[in-house]
Image: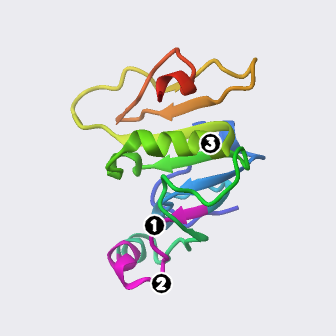
């Protein structure tokens, strides 16, 4: 599938998440992953308040990624463990309470939470390419983070312990 995107899809995300069904929080047309996801955003793509985001997507790639479900990213309207993964690119840093978002994503994701977030120090080299939490043996979640000039959260503790 050819994507009309400004950035190439993440090879890390594709490797981990292809053939799974997930939720993308705040997806955008210029940064598509080509994964089997529904796009959740706090505003519908036709809402007048969404216009600045829509016009930026149009300017960059000539289309707007539709919003499938309107909901705050930290209050998802889905049952527990209803999707294989949650993916978020350049969104977590916009939450007033990012821990509440992580807890909510852990609630709905069966397998993975994949986060890409901007580096607050652009000149600082990234020390890891991604971090995976070792938690599958007992059914707990893995947390995958991409770090290509981005800040990475790293921990060897299970996600459930990390966000308590």
Q: Residues within 10 Å of mark 1 (few under 14, many from 20)?
A: some
Q: What residue is shown with label 1?
A: 42
Q: Is residue 11 visible?
A: no
Mark 3 and mark 2 lie on one chain; the one further toward the N terminus is 2
Report the side of 111 relative to 143 (left or right). Answer: right
Residues in magenta? 39-55
Q: What residue is shown with label 2?
A: 46
Report the side of 130 relative to 123 (left or right). Answer: right
Could you give the CA–CA distance between mark 3 and mark 2, rounded to whole angstroms?
A: 29 Å
Residue found at x 47% / y 27%: 164
Mark 3 and mark 1 lie on one chain; the one further toward the N terminus is 1
Viewer-proximal residue among 54 and 129:
54
> Would you place residue 13 above or below residue 152 in this image?
below
Q: Return the x and y of residue 149 as percentages of the image width and height.
A: 35, 35
Q: Which mark is residue 114?
A: none
Residue found at x 45% / y 60%: 6
- The mark lying in front, picked from 3 and 1, is 3
Could you give the CA–CA distance between mark 3 and mark 1, rounded to whole angstroms?
A: 18 Å
Marks counted in the figure total 3
Quadrant location of the N terminus?
A: bottom right
Q: Residues within 10 Å of mark 2 (few under 14, many from 20)?
A: few
Q: Are marks 3 and 1 in contact (CB under 8 Å)?
A: no
> Would you place residue 81 above or below residue 141 in this image?
below
Q: Residues within 10 Å of mark 3 (few under 14, many from 20)?
A: some
Q: Are marks 3 and 2 in contact (CB under 8 Å)?
A: no
Viewer-proximal residue among 104 and 117:
104
Secondary-structure class at tag 1: loop
Q: Return the x and y of residue 105 as percentages of the image width and height.
A: 56, 44
Q: What residue is shown with label 3?
A: 107
Residue found at x 75% / y 46%: 20
Could you give the CA–CA distance between mark 2 and mark 1, rounded to whole angstroms?
A: 12 Å
Asked if residue 150 lies in the magenta stretch, the reply is: no
């Amino acid at each position: 599938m050819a994507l009309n995107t400004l950035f190439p899809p993440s090879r890390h995300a594709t490797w981990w998440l292809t053939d799974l069904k997930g939720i993308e929080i705040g997806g955008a047309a210029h940064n598509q992953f080509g994964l089997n996801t529904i796009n959740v955003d706090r505003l519908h793509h036709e809402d007048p308040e969404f216009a600045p985001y829509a016009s930026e997507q149009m300017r960059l790639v000539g289309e707007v990624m539709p919003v499938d479900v309107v909901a705050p990213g930290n209050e998802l309207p889905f049952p527990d463990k209803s999707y294989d993964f949650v993916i978020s690119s350049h969104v977590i840093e916009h939450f007033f309470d990012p821990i509440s978002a992580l807890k909510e994503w852990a609630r709905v994701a069966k397998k993975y939470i994949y986060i890409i977030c901007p580096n607050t120090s652009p000149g600082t080299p990234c020390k890891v390419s991604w971090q995976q939490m070792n938690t599958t043996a007992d059914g707990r979640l893995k947390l995958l983070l991409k770090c290509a000039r981005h800040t990475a959260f790293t921990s060897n503790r299970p996600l459930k312990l990390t966000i308590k």
